[in-house]
Image (cartoon, rainbow, N blue to C red):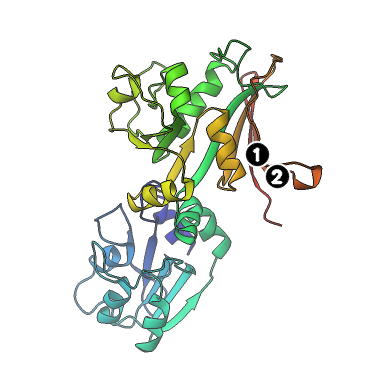
Amino acid sequence: MRRALELAARGPDTGVNPRVGCVILNANGETLAEGWHRGAGSRHAEVDALSQLAPGLSRGSTVVVTLEPCNHVGRTGPCAVALIDAGVARVIYSVTDPGEHSCGGAKRLHTAGIAVEGGLLADDGETLLGDWLVAARLGRPFITLKWASSLDGRAAAFDGSSRWITGATARLDVHRRRAASDSILVGTGTVLADDPALTARDFAGDLLAGQPIPVVVGRRTLPASAAVFAHPHPPLFFDGLDLPGLLADLHKRAVRTVFIEGGPTVASAFVAAGLVDEYLIYLAPTLIGGPRLALGDIGVETIGEQRRLSIHSLHRLGDDILIVARPQTT
């Protein structure tokens, strides 16, 4: 299973499909074939491994796979059926498939007389699948909210200027994380105030290979000259009145992750609605004061209603600090 997890990590970590790895063993525990999923439309890990074997060699084998074999027809056929047709004797998987349409592979395999075991190295499997599991279980993208602020919680000075609170190392880290996300979301207020390009760039200012789809929320009209219209991906626009509906729409478009970089109005709306899965808070060793807070009203009226977070990690980025936090689940 550890080898299957290593293979799975070779696959893309964006898009609607999970990263999956597979190892096929003979009766003596020797590896016959390996495979992994390379992205939407490509062969699933189990089929990729089976394709490397001559007809009949898979009969009686053990298949070790990081995710329960799928049980639906999408761009490819059900992996459960492919394994049944291949005559495998045993299937061991790490994580149960939570998909509404893709689940049920283990039951189908068992019904066909194949021995099935699940949950092997499940914690490692869940860690690998990360945001994909959240999206699959909730039917919406995994939401990361980012802001940069002074130590006293200000995201801008009194006049609205905010470039730059953090240093170059922190800003480069943001661009790296943008590139790893399917989409980047801001409000029309941010576009009108800062005219951001919403691209992911390297230290020299050149475009990185991965570029998030720009998503703009709000009802204000943007000028045709706005930098967002020059983005490599056409921007998507939503009025912001229905955040769950917005996220459901993005989910249908195969957007797995959303990186929110909007101002306090947009950020507060998502926090208040309980729609943030991860917080990236870049703190600069500076004091600004004034009314320009990173967050506004999030629906907390008494101390008992505060939104408690768990610190996942801390990173020193030059003179700045990045706090990665997630909502407490208990």
**Mark toward the start of the polypeptide (1 vs 2):** 1
Residue drawn at the location 41% of the way across and 21% of the way down:
196
Q: Nearer the viewer, residue 135 or 221?
A: 221
Residue drawn at the location 60% of the way across and 41% of the way down:
271
Residue drawn at the location 41% of the way across and 37% of the way down:
239
Residue 114 lies, in percent from the top left, at 38, 85
Question: Amino acid under label 2?
Answer: Arg
Quarter of the image with the C terminus is bottom right
Question: Amino acid under label 1?
Answer: Ile
- Element class at badge 2: loop
Q: Nearer the viewer, residue 81 or 61?
A: 81
Residue drawn at the location 72% of the way across and 41% of the way down:
300
Which marked residue is nearer to the observer: mark 1 or mark 2?
1
Q: Quadrant of residue 28?
A: bottom left
Labels 1 & 2 near each other (Cβ < 8 A): yes
Q: Quadrant of residue 203?
A: top left
From the viewer's perspective, tell me whether residue 327 is left or right of residue 139.
right
Residue 296 lies, in percent from the top left, at 64, 31
Which residue in the rendered view is the most extreme toward the right? 303
Residue 130 lies, in percent from the top left, at 51, 52
- Element class at badge 1: loop
Residue 133 lies, in percent from the top left, at 48, 57
Which residue in the rendered view is the most extreme toward the left? 55
Residue 262 visible in image: yes
Label 1: how many Cα within 10 Å (few below 14, some 14–19, many 20+): some
From the viewer's perspective, tell me whether residue 303 is left or right of residue 56.
right
Reading the image, the residue beneath label 1 is 298
Residue 10 visible in image: no
Give me the disc on residue 307: 2
Q: Nearer the viewer, residue 174 or 290?
A: 290
From the viewer's perspective, tell me whether residue 322 is left or right of residue 91.
right
Q: Marks 1 and 2, Cα distance to the nearest angstrom?
A: 9 Å
